[in-house]
Image (cartoon, rainbow, N blue to C red):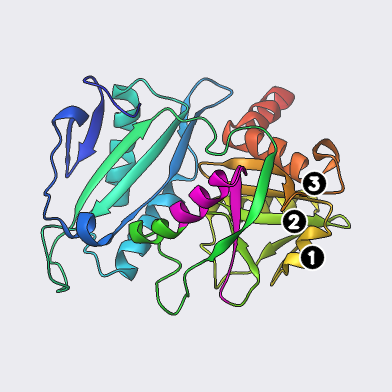
Amino acid sequence: MYYNDNTFIFLNGEIVKASEAKTDLYGQTLHYGYGVFEGIRSYKTSEGKTKIFKEVAHFDRLKNSADALNLPYNWDNDDLIKATYEILKLNDLQDAYIRPLVYAPANMSFVRNSESFIAIEAWEMKPFLGDELLSVMTSSFERPNPKGFKIEAKATGHYVNSILASQEAKAKGYDEALLKDMKGFVAEAPGANFFVEKNNVLYTPQAGNILPGITRATILEICNRLGIHTVEKNITLAEVHGADSAFFCGTAAEVIGIASLDKILFRKEWKDSLGRVIQKEYKNLVTEKQKQQKLETVS
């Protein structure tokens, strides 16, 4: 479902067939989850062009994640972005999900590595959590203690926590999970950030116990432009249960509304929520529809 015999990837400076790519089974990333990655999307714009959304921010975060984990990062991000566009072109992709991965060499010790490797893959992917309102449960799993991890790094091993939480929710008949932090405050979804609306204000968990996503930052930018008041704070579960609406956001998930948390419905209909306003604005932004409308108005 991710590749076939005609799929190309970028691997350590070369473009190769995905079906012919190889990795070392003694690699430290495979054995210990010691690697970093990014989730990026490209879109077919309203002008018909292919545009990677916030590519510089994503590749900058990839480097920052590698630096945080002491993984050597010896690539030029401008070159990696060019290679990514080449991969999209060769695979005839416009609306695509892009996964750069920095991984470690063979190393069964915990000694610092002198080199790293990189792969960039792309494939078609619909919104990660679908496009219907979600039924969400509060997870029994907590987000990792930020004193035990570099929580700001998008590290491969961190996502074992995400997988377990998501699998638990689905096994119990829910669409997705919402995790708390070690202090009992609401944190985030397994692969997305969280916003909740109450009295025409959007609240989102403050940085420190979450991965502050690029999409989350984009939502805050949109809100600032539209005059929607936002607050970053510690949020209790009780505050969410009594709220008007809520949504998840992330590169893979985009912006997706939540119908209920722990079977408690939110008060507003999604169509009347601030989240729905944000959802439409976000789609216009990534497809550059607003830019096209401005050009048409000027002409």
Q: Is residue 68 found left or right of 257 in the rendered image?
A: left
Q: Are marks 1 and 2 in contact (CB under 8 Å)?
A: yes
Q: Which residue is mark 3?
A: 274
- Furthest-front residue in view? 172
Q: Are marks 1 and 3 in contact (CB under 8 Å)?
A: no
Residue 189, position as x, y percentages in the image: 57, 54
Q: Which residue is mark 2?
A: 196
Residue type, label 2: Val
Q: Which residue is mark 1?
A: 239
Work out whether 42 lies above or below 23. Answer: above
Of residues 26 and 139, the one nearer the viewer is: 139
In the image, the segment drawn in magenta is 162-182
Residue type, label 1: Glu
Quarter of the view holding residue 28: bottom left
On the question of residue 74 being in view, the answer is no
Residue pictured at 71% horizontal, 69% vertical: 235
Residue pictured at 86% horizontal, 45% vertical: 268
Work out whether 185 lies above or below 40. Answer: below
Residue pictured at 78% horizontal, 66% vertical: 238
Residue pictured at 73% horizontal, 65% vertical: 237
Q: CA distance from mark 1 to mark 2?
A: 9 Å
Q: Are marks 3 and 2 in contact (CB under 8 Å)?
A: no
Quarter of the view holding residue 107: bottom left
Q: Is residue 167 magenta?
A: yes
Q: CA distance from mark 1 to mark 3?
A: 17 Å
Question: Label 1 crowding class (10 Å Cα cut-off): few <14, some 14-19, many 20+?
Answer: few
Question: Label 2 crowding class (10 Å Cα cut-off): few <14, some 14-19, many 20+?
Answer: many
Residue 24, position as x, y percentages in the image: 11, 49
Residue type, label 3: Leu
Residue 62, position as x, y percentages in the image: 36, 56
